Image (spheres, rainbow, N blue to C red):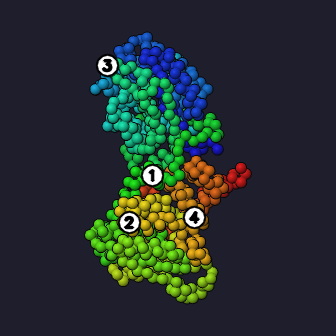
């Protein structure tokens, strides 16, 4: 399966060895970089600003000897791309009708596709470019003949794939990024999804951090990939030092960064997820506000991905837990922020309604524990006692002593009001009422318990002037792993925006930062308990026998599926490919395909449960609120998605 079918484009930024004003030497090093890029199956290669001559030539830029040599070197480099599909972007000075322009040339398969002149010419601090170069607005030609070829020239060039009108790239040069409205912003609004910046930014103390921030931020505001190549220490050090700081960012995420202060050729690569960027733009109604592409001239290029080898290894790290930051410090910040969002939302609801109590069912599991912590925090921050939280634990047929003891211990440790209601007798009565054999442990057996618990909570809330705080999480809602009008319902659901894989970290953060020693003991025990609805009787030794992940598959996998379906717009084939990259040998292909079928089947068939969710705060970028991010017909067909899953199953069987 070729990578281009999943939409990944490999980009590279190279900073080759150079000698100032030696175009022949520089051209040879650029050609070496092209060969290196081709060996790594790069599709788009960008080299630094004025890399054919060097950026620091100063008044030598006015010498005809240098300009002619630069043009000759450009033609040599272009000839070196003959028979190659990759796009190459190189920098050189070009004189046009008596003015000199700092240009980026776009090359492919022996041709010069276009020349883009620099728009913003810096003349402050260490920069003195107006002495030599004119800005793009002073250009009086739209075309230039080079080696007998008519070459389009201008900062109004948009390079668009012959095969796909939605695959386009644009170019700005160095200083263009540092101005209030960079040309790349307009290029992105006009459709460029890849943005390239050949640069010669020198090094100063602290400048690398600012440069990194600029590139990352621009990629985010443009919802694009931003590829930045800078010249290295081969430039003149008369007054400045250049570090070769190259960067590749995608929609705010830094994918690759070069080592600085090297003279030998360095190249960084990354695979850009083009469909993900296009999906993000499509769902942002404001992305194209006020701008179109009518002002740009379209220059066609051949999609380099068409010649890729079929088994190119992905040059990109795929996170197996995209909802959970890998950096412990960032993870702690995320957990604290989530608790603050949840707590603030519940505080507003309590203040608005004026309730006397918050009523919550505590099972000794992760979800109800987190909701309970939020309820206690909300009351405390409202200046009210924790006893205003009525915590109800309702042992049933599947309750184990471990979960019961953890629930009761935690409630007492936090000072909430404890109420124990054994639901077994009520459930047996209900079985008798509806004529169900209690020895038949089917869905009815399970759901009777869930609905009995919800009825108790609702009635206690009415009795005590309170509201029921819901405990169900985002992962359960995605899979419909909740009983309709049972644990599915509440007056305010604080966990509805948080995936299962993240909840344990939020609870752990509370245990480490806000809980006392007694509460911490129970919280850590809850984290170590297997995930279960505890609706089936335990084993003879009192152990949980109904583990959710044994039935559905691992939540870490389902959260991965959910993230890539809703956040990146990926279909089953691409999700499977990404999952295999992310989990490696942790799961077999057959296991992943099987769980993928479970995911899509349940996601579509269980939408009716999400269509009537109670209010609750949005926490992250993925949400299933029917009033917010996700609006879907409850009877939408899953046929397209399941058909692709079945094809994947057939492929796996044949492999």
Question: In the image, which disc is placed on residue 131?
Answer: 3
Q: Secondary structure at mark 3?
A: helix
In this rendering, which labeled residue sits more in front, label 3 or label 2?
2
Q: Residues within 10 Å of mark 3 (few under 14, many from 20)?
A: some
Percent across and percent down for residue 550 are 60, 65
Q: Is residue 153 visible?
A: no
Q: Nearer the viewer, residue 330 or 85?
A: 330
Question: In the image, which disc is placed on residue 325?
Answer: 1
Query: In this figure, which residue is indicated by the disc labeled 4?
Result: 549
Q: Is residue 628 above or below residue 206?
A: below
Q: CA distance from mark 1 to mark 4?
A: 22 Å
Q: Residues within 10 Å of mark 1 (few under 14, many from 20)?
A: some
Is 308 left, or right, of 211 in this rendering?
Answer: right
CB under 8 Å between callouts 4 and 3?
no
Percent across and percent down for residue 103 are 42, 24
In this rendering, which labeled residue sits more in front, label 4 or label 3?
4
Mark 4 or mark 3, earlier in chain: 3
Mark 1 or mark 2, earlier in chain: 1
Mark 3 or mark 1, earlier in chain: 3
Mark 1 or mark 4, earlier in chain: 1
CB under 8 Å between callouts 3 and 2?
no
Q: CA distance from mark 4 to mark 3?
A: 68 Å
Q: Is residue 452 above or below residue 500?
A: below
Q: Is residue 386 visible?
A: yes
Q: Residues within 10 Å of mark 4 (few under 14, many from 20)?
A: some
Q: Secondary structure at mark 1?
A: loop
For the N terminus, the image quarter is: top right
Q: CA distance from mark 2 to mark 4?
A: 30 Å
Query: In this figure, which residue is indicated by the disc labeled 2?
Result: 517
| The image quarter in which residue 512 lies | bottom left
């Amino acid at each position: 399966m070729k990578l281009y079918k999943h939409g990944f484009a490999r980009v590279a930024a190279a900073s080759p060895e150079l000698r100032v004003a030696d175009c022949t030497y520089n051209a040879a090093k650029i050609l070496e970089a092209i060969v290196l890029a081709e060996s790594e199956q790069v599709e788009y290669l960008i080299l630094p600003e004025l890399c054919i001559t060097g950026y620091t030539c100063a008044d030598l830029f006015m010498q005809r000897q240098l300009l002619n040599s630069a043009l000759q070197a450009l033609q040599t480099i272009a000839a070196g791309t003959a028979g190659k599909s990759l796009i190459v972007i190189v920098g050189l000075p070009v004189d046009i009708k008596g003015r000199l322009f700092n240009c980026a040339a776009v090359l492919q398969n022996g041709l010069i596709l276009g020349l883009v002149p620099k728009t913003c010419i810096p003349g402050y601090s260490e920069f003195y470019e107006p002495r030599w170069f004119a800005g793009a607005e002073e250009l009086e030609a739209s075309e230039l003949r080079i080696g007998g070829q008519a070459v389009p020239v201008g900062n109004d060039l948009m390079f668009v794939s012959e095969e796909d009108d939605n695959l386009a790239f644009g170019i700005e040069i160095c200083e263009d990024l540092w101005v209030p409205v960079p040309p790349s912003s307009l290029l992105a609004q006009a459709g460029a999804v890849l943005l390239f910046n050949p640069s010669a930014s020198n090094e100063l103390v602290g400048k690398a951090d600012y440069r990194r921030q600029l590139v990352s931020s621009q990629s985010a505001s443009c919802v694009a990939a931003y590829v930045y190549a800078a010249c290295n220490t081969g430039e003149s050090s008369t007054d400045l030092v250049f570090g070769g700081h190259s960067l590749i960012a995608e929609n705010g995420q830094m994918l690759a960064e070069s080592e600085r202060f090297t003279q030998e050729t360095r190249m960084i690569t990354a695979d850009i997820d083009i469909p993900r960027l296009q999906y993000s733009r499509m769902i942002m109604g404001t992305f194209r506000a006020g701008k179109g592409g009518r002002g740009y001239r379209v220059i066609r290029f051949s999609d380099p991905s068409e010649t890729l080898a079929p088994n190119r290894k992905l040059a990109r790290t795929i996170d197996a837990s995209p909802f959970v930051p890998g950096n412990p410090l960032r993870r702690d910040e995320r957990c604290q922020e989530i608790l603050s969002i949840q707590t603030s939302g519940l505080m507003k609801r309590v203040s608005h309604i004026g309730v006397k109590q918050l009523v919550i069912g505590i099972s000794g599991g992760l979800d109800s524990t987190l909701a309970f912590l939020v309820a206690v925090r909300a009351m405390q921050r409202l200046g009210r006692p924790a006893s205003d939280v009525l915590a109800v634990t309702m042992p049933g047929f599947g309750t184990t002593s471990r979960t019961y003891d953890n629930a009761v211990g935690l409630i007492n440790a936090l000072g909430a009001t404890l109420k124990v209601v054994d639901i077994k007798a009520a459930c047996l009565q209900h079985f008798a009422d509806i004529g169900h054999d209690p020895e038949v442990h089917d869905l009815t057996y399970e759901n009777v318990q869930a609905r009995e618990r919800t009825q108790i909570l609702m009635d206690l809330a009415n009795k005590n002037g309170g509201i029921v705080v819901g405990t169900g999480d985002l992962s359960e809602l995605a899979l419909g792993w909740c009983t309709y009008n049972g644990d599915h319902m509440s007056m305010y659901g604080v966990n509805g925006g948080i995936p299962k894989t993240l909840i344990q970290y939020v609870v752990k953060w509370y245990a480490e930062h806000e809980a006392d020693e007694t509460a911490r003991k129970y919280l850590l025990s809850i984290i170590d308990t297997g995930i279960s609805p505890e609706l089936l009787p335990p084993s003879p030794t009192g152990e949980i026998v109904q583990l959710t992940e044994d039935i559905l598959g691992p939540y870490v996998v389902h959260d991965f599926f959910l993230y890539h379906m809703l956040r990146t717009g990926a279909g089953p084939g691409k999700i499977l490919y990404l999952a295999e990259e992310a989990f490696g040998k942790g799961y077999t292909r057959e296991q992943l395909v099987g769980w993928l079928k479970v995911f899509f089947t349940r996601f579509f068939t269980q939408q009716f449960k999400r269509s009537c969710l109670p209010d609750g705060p949005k926490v992250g970028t993925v949400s299933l609120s029917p009033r917010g991010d996700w609006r879907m017909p409850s009877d939408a067909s899953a046929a397209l998605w399941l058909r692709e899953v079945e094809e994947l199953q057939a492929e796996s069987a044949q492999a």
